Amino acid sequence: MSFVDEYTNFIFLEDQLEPADIIFIPGSDQGALARRAAGLWKEGYAPVLLPSGKYGKLTGHFTGEPGFKTEWEYFRHILITEGVPEEAVWKEDQAAFTYENALRSREVTDRAGLTVRKAILCCQAYHARRAKLYYQVCFPETELLVCPVVTKDVSRDNWFLKEESIRLVLDEMKRCGTQFHEIFLEHRKQSL
């Protein structure tokens, strides 16, 4: 196995999907995530969807399609346009980064009284590992099934072919270490 395969297998996750309690959609300006999640809802994989996100912490505003103020608002629009009823789209519109997507999503499910035994995580393919790590921290009792969506033309089959894709994937590797390191230490302190 080459070093490229090692990186690929770490970052790009995909699970066999099964019926679940909820579909999580971490914040992004990539509408393909909401379209894929709507398809999963139509196929009966989960009764509710929880898109999460205000906008990126670094930009301070929504960078996607004009006319939307938050990632949640954008995702909600797509989900409803794709045929998902409003009552099936739950709301989390305050998170500004991936760990907050998971934290705030946990708050929403707890307030709703939903015990999440199994969840589908509909995320960008190159973001799958980090997203799963964060949601695992916030939903430790939940079986998380990753449903990756290829965005920005970055997939497990081509990420190593273009400089921009290589940067995106290797930045994800970096964040899995630096960002999760802080979270891991905080959880360790809490468990002592």
Image (cartoon, rainbow, N blue to C red):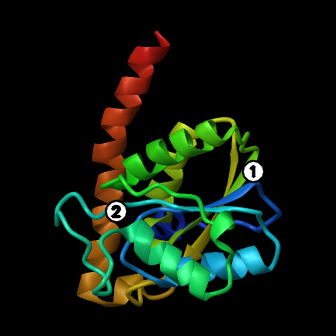
Image check: 45 left or right of 70? right
Label 1 is placed on what type of residue?
Lys
Secondary element under disc 2, as helix, strand or loop, is: helix
> Residue tagged by mark 1?
118
Q: Earlier in the sequence, mark 2 or mark 1?
A: 1
Front residue of 34/85: it is 85
The answer to whether residue 100 is seen in the rendering is yes
Question: Residue reaching furthest front?
Answer: 86
Question: Residue 47: horizontal and vertical position, in percent?
Answer: 77, 63
Question: Residue reaching furthest left?
Answer: 59
Question: Residue 182: horizontal and vertical position, in percent?
Answer: 31, 34
**Which residue is drawn at the image coordinates 69% and 37% (left, top)?**
113
**Which residue is drawn at the image coordinates 43% and 25% (left, top)?**
187
**Which residue is drawn at the image coordinates 42% and 71% (left, top)?**
73
Name above or below for residue 60 compared with residue 117.
below
Question: Residue 179: horizontal and vertical position, in percent?
Answer: 31, 45
Which corner quadrant of the image does residue 161 belong to? bottom left
| Marks 2 and 1, how far apart at CA | 25 Å
- The circle on residue 87 is none
Name above or below for residue 144 compared with residue 123.
above
Mark 2, other Cα within 10 Å: few <14 / some 14–19 / many ≥20: some
> Residue tagged by mark 2?
172
Which corner quadrant of the image does residue 88 belong to? bottom right
Label 2 is placed on what type of residue?
Glu
In what quadrant of the picture does the N terminus appear? Answer: bottom right
The reply to whether the C-beta atoms of the residues labelled 2 and 1 are less than 8 Å apart is no
- How many labels, in total? 2
Question: Residue 62: horizontal and vertical position, in percent?
Answer: 26, 72
Q: Nearer the viewer, mark 2 or mark 1?
A: 1
Image check: 63 left or right of 80? left
Secondary element under disc 1, as helix, strand or loop, is: strand
**Which residue is drawn at the image coordinates 43% and 21% (left, top)?**
188
